[in-house]
Amino acid sequence: MCESAGTHFLGYSREAGRPGVRNHLLILNATGLTEPTARRLHAMLPGSVLASTAYGMGLIGFDAQRQLATLVGLAANPNVGAVLILSADRLRSESLLTALQSVGKEVEAVSYQDVAHDALRMTDAAFRCGAALMRHISRQRRSPHAISELIVGMECGLSDPTSGIAANPLMGRVTDRLVEQGATVIVGETLEWLGTEEKLACRGVDEQTSEAIRTAVLRREAMARDAGISLTDTNPNRANIDAGLSTIEEKASGSVAKSGTSPVNGVLAYSEAPWGKGLYLMDAPSYTPESLSGFVAAGAQLLLFSTGIGNSYVSAIAPTLKLSANEDTVRNLPQQIDLDCSSLIAGTSGMEECIDTSLQTLLEIASGTLTWGEAVGEGSESISRFGESL
């Protein structure tokens, strides 16, 4: 598989930053007016991936800043070999081009103003650019890279008791192993720290980090309270409750197990890149599509995602490795679950064996093996909003 099993993977070297585990052409659509064209081009360019926002104009303040940062982060992700930007407004395209200058990737942009506001002309011009970019990146080849070059996002969705009992603790042990080997891990879903925030805060590398953990949880709790939302009925959601989880604290205690025991080096804003190696928390929504895109925009090349009852959503840009400790789910969803860890519940495998299997599978995916989500084309990206548009 690679130069040294368990320590290296085969990835794509980049002019700047970490290596990619994929080599995508990213169609990056920056305005709602051009989204239909972007979807048409995505269909016309097999093998491309699409990230799109319908809110490119009229954004202000923190919302505008995070939207731009997330678009830039998605384009800068190591798994992206080249970028084709579409926009209704040339200034919007130019702001993205300027922000991506230091990334060292091939980038082309087409705006409505370049094609006399004709969607069909835009389709033709952008298709020609996209085809050239795809041919260009097809010349790149994989080479060995150390596991320490990986950023891995940890997620759980549609959890059940097996998630907290086995799958998420396994992810936590994988987190610790990755951190020990010099890799970087990001854990998000802020609201699912509720009830465990003091234990997390005790792991902060300094008081500033510890206080940031507490503040992030209290802010999200206040958001729900001010909106008149009962977290008992919302998180866990009805599917979680039906699966056997009763309270947000119960769900949180299982969810934060993904973070393992390593020190927390910092709390990231949504889509903010880690400033070093080790474990980071991301203050971000718990909703899976937004959470995964936040990790990817922060630079995660791989995502490890546990589910109790099944969750088909995956990132378009970063391979999303699905694991479950629920024997029924593994049996019923053979084209969704990449890693069966139900043996932990059955007692037929030990934790150390499952850690080794998980890391080996992670490196195989990093080296080119498709996840089920990739094989069946489930991938998408969803960018969070933080305010009203003008």
Image: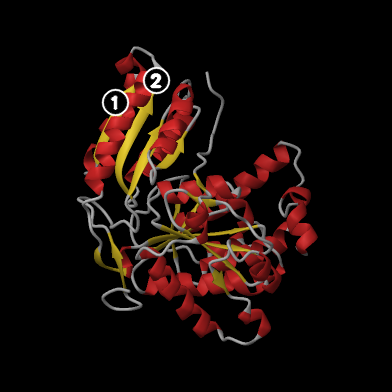
Instruction: Quadrant for the N terminus, please.
Output: bottom left
Q: Position of residue 283 (x, y in %)?
A: 52, 49
Q: Look at label 1 and name its amino acid.
A: Glu
Q: How is the image coloured?
A: secondary structure
- Residues 167 and 199: in front is 167
Q: Residues within 10 Å of mark 1 (few under 14, many from 20)?
A: some
Q: Is residue 300 left or right of residue 167?
A: left
Q: Position of residue 138 (x, y in %)?
A: 25, 50
In the depicted structure, whether residue 109 falls above or below residue 275: above
Label ID, residue 120 = 2
How far apart are the alpha carbons under marks 1 and 2? 22 Å
Label ID, residue 146 = none
> Is any part of residue 319 visible from this angle?
yes
- Residues 176 and 344: in front is 344
Q: Residue furthest top?
A: 116
Q: Which residue is mark 1?
A: 94
The quadrant in which residue 38 appears is: top left
Q: Look at label 2 and name its amino acid.
A: Leu
Q: Nearer the viewer, mark 1 or mark 2?
A: 2
Q: Residue at x 32, y 28 (%)?
A: 126
> Is any part of residue 284 visible from this angle?
no
Q: Is residue 136 left or right of residue 74?
A: left
Q: Position of residue 305 (x, y in %)?
A: 54, 61
Mark 1 vs 2, N-terminal side: 1
Q: Residue at x 36, y 77 (%)?
A: 6
